[in-house]
Amino acid sequence: MDGVSQTSVTSPLVGREDELARLTGVLDRARAGEARAVLVAGDAGVGKTRTLDEVAGRAAAAGTTVLTGHCVDLGDVGLPYLPFTEVLGVLAADERFAAVLAAHPVADRLLGGGPEEGGAAAPSRLRLFEGVAALLTDLAGVAPLLLVLEDLHWADQSSRDLLRFLLSRGVLQRSAGTAPTRRLALFASYRADDLHRRHPLRPLLAELVRLPGVERLELRPLPDADVARLVRGLRERRLPDTTVRRIVERAEGNAFYAEELVAATDAPDGGVPSGLADVLLIRFEQLSETAQQVLRTAAVAGRRVGHDLLRDAVGLPEEELESALREAVERQLLVSGHEDTYSFRHALAREAVYADLLPGERARLHGAFARLLAGPDRRSDSAAERAHHSRESHDLPEALAASLEAADHAQRVGAPAEELRHVEAALDLWSAVDAAARPAGPDAVTLTLRASAAAAHAGELHRAVSLTRSALAGLGQDADLELAARVRYTLAGNLLSVDNLSAAYAHSSEALGLIPAEPPSSTWVWAAATHVMAGRQVGENETALRVARRALRVAEDLDVTDARADLLISLTSLEGGNRSTPAGRERLLEARELARRAGNAPVELRALFNLAIGSFESGDLRECLHWASQGLDRARRAGLLSSPYPREMRYLRLLVQYTLGHWDEVLRESAGQAEALPAVDGHALGPGLYVALARGDSGAADRARALLEGPFDWMARMVGGLVLTDAAALRGDAEDAVRWMRSSVEALTEAGTRPAVTVRLAALALSAVADTVAGLRRAGDGAGAARWQETAADLLAEARRSAEHGYDDVPQGPEGQAWLARAEAEWSRISAAGPDPAPWERAVAAFTYGDSYERAWCRLRLAEALLAADRREEAAAEADAVRREADRLGTALLRERLDDLARRGRLTDPARGGPGGAVLTAREQDVLRLLALGHTNRRIGEELFISAKTASVHVSNILAKLHAASRTEAVAVAHRRGLIAPEPTSR
């Protein structure tokens, strides 16, 4: 039978894989004759109906009869048996069920009314219940049956009684010792947030969940990532990332709220959509007037408020306040927390109550909170709240003073993003407050400079540039020269951080020219230090070296210790002591100590970054990890994790883990950064994308392409270029690989200097070109092969130049030389008369410095060349080494290429010789183990730190290798073959 009741679905279903798998499992057991019931709980809008619609649709498609009944909120005059009469009405309208209904007069009695409704005598009521149970049993005898009851929190008393009977004595019961025979499942949903303490459904639920055939499933709020997927899926046109993040933040995991907020994205005010506000205020309006007054006051306080502060603001006697709070908590509008605080259960509920206030009422309550927070017992961290309440109550002088106090507090505790927000608030208020009422101290330009520094420390680099430009525009004709120089060299430093190098050099030149070197001043020293960095970036090395040496002498004379440290770091490169050499390392250590002693965390971080990357360039990966970890620890203590150098060090640490083959750690840390950091970019995503691409994640290229959107970012461009070039090479698209390689090198070239990554990009593109040339030659297209050979020669020349002229124009270290060896080996596939293993042997040896994945690829090519040279035993040995590494890393692409080579070359794969577990890769073994536990693809992905899509690919591979038609069959086959260890049994 087909399902007979389905709800129209318009929004996508996301993030409910585990719940759907559990409900589907219950349906599978019901189809096998074991009647089951699930009570589905969740807050309003969390997705109960959508989830049940999805599982009902799947059940109907599988031949299950689906019957749905809805409970409706009719207050105290609810209609008896409403959801059941709805079900019977659907059955009565369908001729397919006429014979079954004719055999059960109970249907007529319920549909037509009668003495059984309401006050029926107990025996008649019992016959009614038994008749409904018999009807459902007979329906389940014709075909598997799914009965869905929605919104059980609104069920009338008679429906609750009938449900109790069906689950405790009716359709789920069976005689002791007999096998289950009823092919029936019952899913009933209810709103958990509607069940106040005296709700009549609460005792029934407590009774039902103790029954052996009944289980409870709670739909929790969706994770942020799933809400973001939902939000993006609701609009054909792409929503800005900032809009998506804001909706995700406000929805707090509630699918309905997210949908409503998306629908209101075009509204100008950005408040709570009116339809959503009406829903949110329904429960609020059911409260007593006193409780409503308390909630209005609490809404002005914010999401959370302390008991004492709320009591003083609302002005109620303690007993009345406690009674009102208890009412709000029982209605699940407020939640009591630790330290005598109360929070709105959902932020949007607070927004709706706040928006419902009258303007005068709102301003009065804000003023009350501002006065209370300014009292003699005020906390040091309350300035931000006081600034907000003062501003909303139109006390602008107090709002300005409190904003500056809040900024000072944020600076002391190392919170640059909050400092930026408060300084910008002060700047907004500055012109609206009379000069006489402003706090003594800074002027608007100095405040703007402070905001730009906070923005840079918070990782908002383009915002820092914008703010410094604003400070420059605010300088008057008679501005102090030292302040004018500070503004210009600060702007130059910020422009360097966003890779606007020529403009940075122009502004640093202006800064240095504004103030004389004599008499010596610390302002001149810092202007010179900035000019040195800018000159170094644009290739003006002679000027940079001359200025740096002079500035270092002045800094020593004036004892400007942190400027000395900064200049020593710059001189490490300018004086030829490259950061990857022992001499360079000694100078960087001296600079680090000077900066530490001066308490200048940004300069200390610059020294630590150079120590870390110098170690990487010299091939000392363990030392690189040491310095990167020290740098990140220092940044964490200073509150500077989002500033430029820690971002670089996060990338370095992930890159080392990737290079060493610790891929699960890379994915774990990348995921953690995505959750913890305000903005995720190429620094955080890069190595994780490299892993994803190597493991066959088809979405890696799309995510890399997304990095290229928005303002130019050097690291994002490099990561995107690497991934997209490699992705094109892996799919054999030489044109795309060469295009991405060339466009990336062009974009990353600074002051005429090719980036060091050019050698890697060229080697990746060369691999695709070599494959293309080989294919053209096999097809007899000599002219086409010759054209591509010219391209390959250009790529090889680029690789050689890049490896020879690295950082500071000296040859690159082990990594660059290894990529050059690979490029030379790829070229040998094009230029050599026959297969030549020697270049590939050199490439394998070059990658021994630490890059296990690239070394495995070179060994695969070596095995191919050895096989072509008829050195089969050596080829088989290399293939075995590749197989072990591919399985350890979980890279499906490398394993597939190896398997293809083994088939073509008839190389024996010892892993396939026996009946045991070696038929699967190590990663597939991990997936199979979780598959046997009944995990969904999403759950498998979470356990193994891979995407659900990648998990799905592994599952498909397992099914193919085990010749299984389903996941269940694959697990059974694996058990028979001993691929899965049996579960331990108790003795």
Image (cartoon, rainbow, N blue to C red):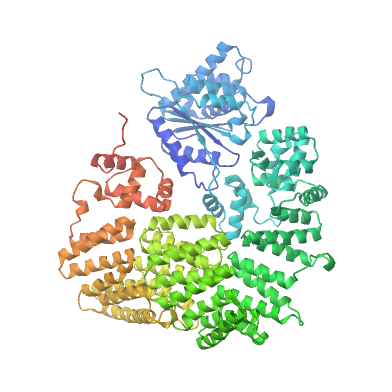
Identify the image quadrant of the N terminus: top left
Along the line of sight, which residue is nearer the eye, 936 or 821? Answer: 821
Q: Is residue 797 above or below residue 912?
A: below
Residue 940 in sight in this render: yes
Q: Residue at x 62, y 66 (%)?
A: 455
x then y, percent, for residue 571 = 50, 81
At which x and y percent is residue 522? 64, 79
Q: Quadrant of the C terminus?
A: top left
Q: Is residue 920 left or right of residue 138?
A: left
Image vertical order of residue 853 relative to residue 256, above or below: below
The answer, for residue 59, to whether it is visible in the render is: no
| Relative to 357, 740 lies left or right | left
Above or below for 494 versus 63: below
Nearest to the observer: residue 242 or residue 537: 537
Q: Is residue 416 above or below residue 357?
A: below
Horizontal and vertical percent position of residue 661? 35, 60
- Residue sitting at x 57%, y 86%: 550
